[in-house]
Image (tube, coloured by chain):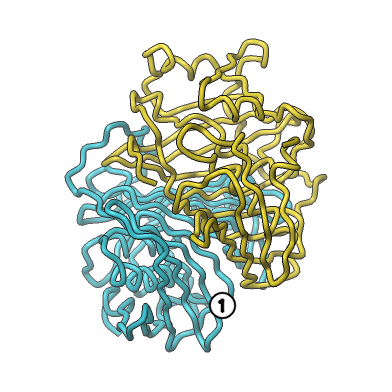
Chain colours: A yellow, B cyan
């Protein structure tokens, strides 16, 4: 398949129904990436609605997605001049794979922030960062997305986790694609789990992920700053802030996930 | 009506349908509090499911709720040993008022955190904090909930906002009620909007609010730490961390809201 735009394309079938083809190149060994699935369902939500930007997306990951056909169902719940809300479901074999609630709006690309919190601590320049190729079955994702990891957060690869939940990387697609709200959906779920830096291993299935689009991203690298607040009772939170090349906060996410389980 | 338990009670009608009575005492001038509405619909979600704790709740506020009868519809989406997921809708006059996605699980009250982030900066003791009674039409909420505000975040009352989005308070019900997941739903949406401290005024309608329950709260005061990262283009985020009397992080929320609008 082609670039990110083609891999997330949807075809309108009428009555709020859309057809998509899940691209296995956005998979890891055990499942298709959740951010990619959100990107696909957001294409349908935006096509069905009146506003261009996915300002709020809450997703529950119910089943493991597989490469191949998928259906997306968009149910409008409230229209509005500023915001429209829909329930959006991605199905395979007639079973819900992702349930989402999506609020769309129109962000002003030239808006000046009335107030902005401090930027996150600086990352090393792109050239001072590491590439990371999980290889084997995980090869596909690294072929789609170019990520450069802050070395301070990659000690877990050598058995030396940083000791606190964190992960940072620069992010862009390998095929040219101008950053937009759809790409931000991929960005907020692209980092390896932050708990790899507290010594946890294995797959960390996301139970719930919500993200907010805050600004229209500028062209260029995105910087992903992942962190967490609590690892307890088999659960952890992971927050990702996405900053664009112009130094603006363009997306915020938080997910609640399980440690070291294979059930999803 | 009686205490918080009685005001949030639901009656099972079968087929995932519940009846509730929205208590106007949890209202402000313009609308019923969103945290209270979440508490009511979570009673139904937990009654309908297999797990006791609302570990993840994402809510979209579609219409203004009014005192009086409401119906709650619980649609199970996925069962599981660890987590169950449902779509939950609160309706009045057959129109959806709140759409929610709820994941329930069972948290171990005795769990020791594997890793915990630093606690928030200390608040003054309860006796050094301020009460705040909006009076008039807003009287009801203050009669239900006892909140003591950190004076450093209340300068906006005297026309001297702190300059950054923040709000902090101790929180408990006036009628004795042992803190649980249902009360945490009220707690995460109980603070005045953090943007009052950036000089914004008026009602700040929530578009989307997601919160995660992280631990079973200990009896006693809860401490609410509200903050934000960006105020831009008429939108702001508000994050609330809830810490219990034992010094544990028991809930995390983030909402995306509009500044100074009356449409909801």
The residue that disc 1 covers is B64
In the displayed structure, does residue A40 sit left or right of residue B252? right
- The C terminus of chain B: image quadrant: bottom right
Which quadrant would residue B173 be assigned to in this image? bottom left
Identify which residue, A256 or A60, lies in the foreground: A60
Q: How many marks?
A: 1
The vertical placement of A59 against A192, above or below, is: below
The vertical placement of A36 against A80, above or below, is: above
Q: Residue at x 40, y 37 (%)?
A: A204
Q: Residue at x 43, y 54 (%)?
A: B211
Q: Position of residue A34 (x, y in %)?
A: 54, 43
Identify which residue, A125 or A247, lies in the foreground: A125
Q: Residue at x 62, y 60 (%)?
A: A72
**Residue furthest toward the left?**
B110
Q: Position of residue A90 (x, y in %)?
A: 57, 57
In the displayed structure, does residue A7 sit left or right of residue A163? right
Check disc 1 and report its element: helix, strand or loop.
loop
Which quadrant would residue B50 be assigned to in this image? bottom left
Identify which residue, A220 or A141, lies in the foreground: A141
Which quadrant would residue B23 be assigned to in this image? bottom left
Disc 1 crowd rating (10 Å Cα; few below 14, some 14-19, many 20+) is some
Q: Residue at x 37, y 85 (%)?
A: B19
Q: Position of residue B220 (x, y in %)?
A: 22, 56
Whether residue B121 appears in this view of the structure is no
In the displayed structure, does residue B215 sit left or right of residue B207? left
**Residue furthest toward the right?**
A110
Q: Position of residue B113 (x, y in %)?
A: 26, 36
Whether residue B48 appears in this view of the structure is yes
- The N terminus of chain B: image quadrant: bottom left
The vertical placement of A81 against A223, above or below, is: below
Chain of the residue under label 1: B
């Amino acid at each position: 398949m082609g670039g990110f735009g083609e891999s997330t394309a949807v075809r309108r079938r009428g009555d709020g129904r859309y057809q998509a083809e899940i691209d296995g190149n956005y998979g890891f060994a055990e499942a298709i990436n959740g951010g990619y699935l959100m990107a696909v369902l957001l294409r349908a939500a935006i096509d069905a609605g009146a506003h261009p930007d996915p300002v709020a997306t809450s997703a529950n990951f119910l089943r493991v997605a597989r490469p191949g056909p998928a259906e997306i169902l968009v149910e409008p719940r409230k229209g509005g001049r500023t915001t429209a809300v829909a329930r959006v479901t991605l199905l395979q074999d007639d079973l819900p794979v992702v349930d989402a609630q999506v609020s769309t709006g129109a962000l002003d690309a030239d808006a000046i922030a009335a107030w902005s919190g401090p930027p996150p601590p600086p990352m090393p320049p792109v050239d001072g960062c590491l590439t990371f190729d999980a290889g084997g079955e995980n090869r596909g994702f690294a072929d789609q997305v170019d990520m450069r990891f802050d070395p301070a957060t990659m000690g877990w690869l050598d058995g030396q986790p940083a000791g606190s939940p964190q992960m940072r990387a620069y992010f862009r697609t390998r095929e040219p694609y101008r950053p937009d709200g759809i790409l931000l959906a991929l960005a907020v779920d692209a980092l390896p789990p932050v708990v790899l830096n507290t010594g946890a291993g294995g797959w960390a299935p996301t139970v719930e992920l919500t993200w907010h689009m805050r600004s229209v991203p500028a062209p260029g690298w995105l910087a992903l700053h992942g962190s967490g607040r609590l690892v307890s009772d088999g659960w952890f939170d992971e927050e990702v802030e996405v900053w664009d090349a112009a130094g603006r906060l363009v997306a915020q996410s938080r997910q609640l996930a399980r440690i070291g389980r294979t059930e999803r």
